[in-house]
Amino acid sequence: MNIVEKTWRGLQSNKPLYTVITLGFVCILGILAGFLSTNILISLLISGTVVLLLLILLIFFRKGTFSLDNIIVPLLVAAVLLPPIRLTRSIPDIRVEPILILIALALFLTGRLATGRPFKLRWNPTNKWFFLFGICILVSIANAAFVHGYYPIDRDFWELGKLIEYFLIFALVASLNIPPEHMRKYYVTSLVIFMCSAAFGFAQYFNLLDINSWLIPYYAPTQIGGLVRGGRIVGTTGNPNEFGALMVLAASLALTGALWLKGRSIKLFSWAALGVFSLAIVFTLSRSSLLCLLVAVAFIALYKYTMHFGFKKLVRMVVSVAPVLLIIAFIVLQLAPDLFFLSMGSGINLDTDASWQARLTNWEDDIALWQQSPLLGWGPGKETISSIVDNEWLLLLRRYGLLGVVVFILWFVSVYRTLSRIGRETRNNYTETFCTSLQATLIAYAIFMIPAGVYHSLQLMPILLIFLGLAYTQRQSLQAVQLK
């Protein structure tokens, strides 16, 4: 038995002390080496390695045995709360969550190789849509090169790398074994993480501890002017619109929990969280996010509630819940900044709204470009087509043509239908809450993609996929029940 297999089997044995001693010894050596080193860069590197080892210990070997099931909360914390790692202008920003995924896969693969077991993630039908959309990307690149003479550059193929990152996040989380009784923990934890993000946004608005000068540049270096002059908070994202979209997901989860879950304490917590998230959306001054919030609320409270509980209970719900929603709306509007009302007033009349009219002008140029290659598109075209498209549907259409957009829509129609099945067949209120809120989010994000973007956001899309993967973990519970 070689040293790798021996060490791995020791970590796999139900002896937490073995894990603590093994990794703790390495950490102590790293700390000593850091203190003894006179080079600052070497000290930082060693210290970072020690921190990484400790995180690996806490996340993957918490009970002394290797397990991937503890990765969801660290993934959510990293994706929602942490800024990207900014190195140099020539190197793209690096998010923490793909690093966690790669570490998890490396440990998983090491364990399989050490014990001779096959490497395999649990398959689900949605996985094929990642593959099909990847084919659309390659076909579009080939069409642009061989038919139109627009040859790709290295950065164009990053769109495939982005899709692979999305697939790994979703496939890994969806493969986990999460018992139905643990969904309550993930619901409460998710709302707490989102509330921390919202609180960070409020701190920006009031510039507590002068964080706008020393901390916010790590999150949104290009948005400092809008934050200082207009008070548009960015929370823990890169811009106000993304933060508004993030809070739409949070508000959908909170509202569904308030309506679906039982127990006074969890309902009160959910209603309070809904108020916090709604206020955060108002502070972003994002009209598209506010519209998406209204769509999500209507979808959950009227359509999904009626489908699940019946029309008679809908009438009772409206009588009891409408006053609560009105109170939340009244409080939020009382706390809203003056610029919010100016922005909303401008958005009511789109014919005179400068921002909307500028978008329409840009869209005309991109529609004309797409019409020259309607079926397969032009590929990413990051070198040859540099115009900014403030419409993600149009961007997808221009890049991947009708074929790519149809596959993209079918991909998320498949996700929506799978969530319906999981929510319908499960007997766990928390699982139903996740499925219903995610369906509302998908509908809202489809609208949000008209003036902004979700798929191309390296923060929003992974967060959405983490939650979708968490909901998909309950397919295993359904299959286990059916086998019995």
Image (tube, helix red, strand yellow):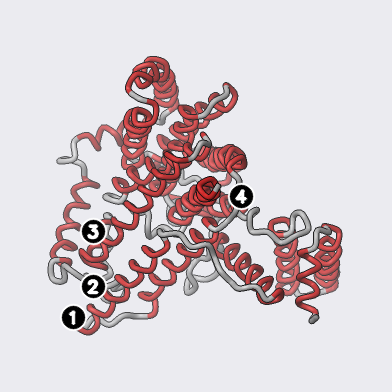
Crowding around mark 1 (Cα neighbors within 10 Å: few <14, some 14 to 19, many 20+) is few
Give whichever of discs 3 and 1 has the lower sequence position. Answer: 1
Q: Quadrant of residue 67?
A: bottom right
Give whichever of discs 2 and 1 has the lower sequence position. Answer: 1
> Residue at position x 42%, y 39% from top?
424
Which amino acid type is shown beneath numbered disc 1?
His
> Residue at position x 39%, y 41% from top?
230
Q: Quadrant of residue 338?
A: top left
Residue 250 appears in the rendering:
yes
Crowding around mark 4 (Cα neighbors within 10 Å: few <14, some 14 to 19, many 20+) is some
Q: Quadrant of residue 264?
A: top right
Residue receiving disc 4 = 73
- Residue 55 horizontal/vertical position (percent): 71, 59
Residue receiving disc 3 = 394
Which amino acid type is shown beneath numbered disc 3?
Leu
> Residue at position x 61%, y 46% from top?
179
Distance (Cα) linking label 3 and label 1: 20 Å
Give whichever of discs 2 and 3 has the lower sequence position. Answer: 2
